Amino acid sequence: MSEDLQHLLTEESLENQKRAQIVERGPDEAQTIIGVVCLLLMCFGSVFNIIVIHAFRKTNSLQTPTNMLIMGIVVSDTAMVLLGYPFVIASSFNGYWMFGSTWCEVYGFIMSFLGVSCLCILTAVALDRYYVVTQSSIAAKITTFKAVMTILTCYGYGMLWATFPLVGWGGYVIEPNLLSCGPDWTNDTASSQSYSISIFLLVLCIPASIILYCYAQICITVRNNKIRVVDQVSRSRLLETRVAFSVLITIGSFFAAWMPYAIMSFWTMFNDVTELNHHVAIIAPLLAKSASVWNPFIYVCRHKEFRDALLAVVIPSMQRNRRRRNNENRSNEETGTSSQRTSKNVAASGTEC
């Protein structure tokens, strides 16, 4: 038996022993809390994301190129909530990833695809806001068709990076928190190291730099040109600027969620993963996944048109339910009044007799 094969068998035996010990021990307190939090986030995120998509579909005035890009993010977030959270929740209450190596690769592929696609669309949104606020002549050429093609391109970009580990460049393994799967940041082989560094630079650092530049220019433009509402054009520009700041908050929340995970992953590339703090290993991926809940909530709260459209979808159903209850109560009252009148008439007839 070769030394390499013997080394692999030894590592597999140690991994199986470790898994058996964890399964026997059961989930710790932190993992149970993660399971409960993820369950709550999944319930809230799935309902809210679906309502936002429904409001967008029902409201023609919202179907602008910028909002189309935002819907690309919301769709990705919805898929992440519905496809990603159940596995983490089940593993949290189990104490260990319980779906085997094949589903680990499937899960890693789906999460990588959605995460990269979402970051790419966020970059496109930042560029869209940059052109609208600073270069209106170029912004006028941005159409809904171009926005849809941009979304599809971003999905293709995400698919590309998610596929690489499946064909030998990098790989998907159980993450240090033992509850989910992702790219193999800890492998010191040339293939895994080159993939990790490439995705860190091309998927995170360069898009982040573009986003920061765009919003820095937006802030400079707004500061140098005090926008006064004196006509319809300036009113429209003021609205576009407010939308830009709404998207800025959305992007800020995205990076606040994903940056701890990115730093943790980069750290594990050059250090012993066993030295990683247990709470950091659990909290960083949780923050990353929570971005799928924050994005639509923040954007809807900051965007008046979206807020009005959402209320227009939700409130009519509430009003219909209220009217139905009122009609039922009125019908019950009329039935009761009619019964009382009948009783009185019967009593009066008896007295006359």
Image: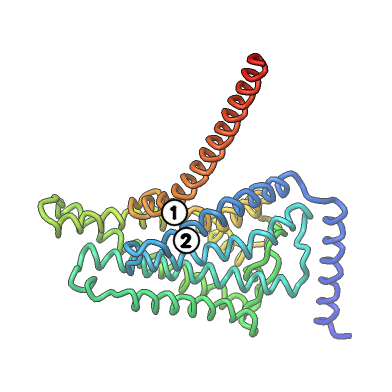
Residue 11: % across, % down: 81, 71
| Left or right: where 295 falls relative to 41 | left
Q: Which mark is residue 313?
A: 1
Looking at the rendered structure, the secondary structure element under dot 1 is helix
Of 2 and 193, the residue lying toward us: 193
Residue drawn at point x = 88 percent, y = 54 percent = 24
- Residue 38 lies left or right of residue 216; in this view the side is right
Q: Amino acid at mark 1?
A: Val
Is 170 situated above or below 261? below
Q: Position of residue 128 (x, y in %)?
A: 31, 68
Which residue is pictured at 58% across the width and 30% down the height?
A: 338
Q: Quadrant of residue 212?
A: bottom left
x and y, in percent, of residue 143 in the image: 29, 75
State whether residue 305 is above or below residue 104. above
Residue 144's spot in the image, x, y percent? 33, 74
Q: Which image quadrant: the N terminus?
A: bottom right
Q: Which residue is mark 2?
A: 54
Within 10 Å of disc 2 (Cα), the crowding (few <14, some 14-19, many 20+) is some
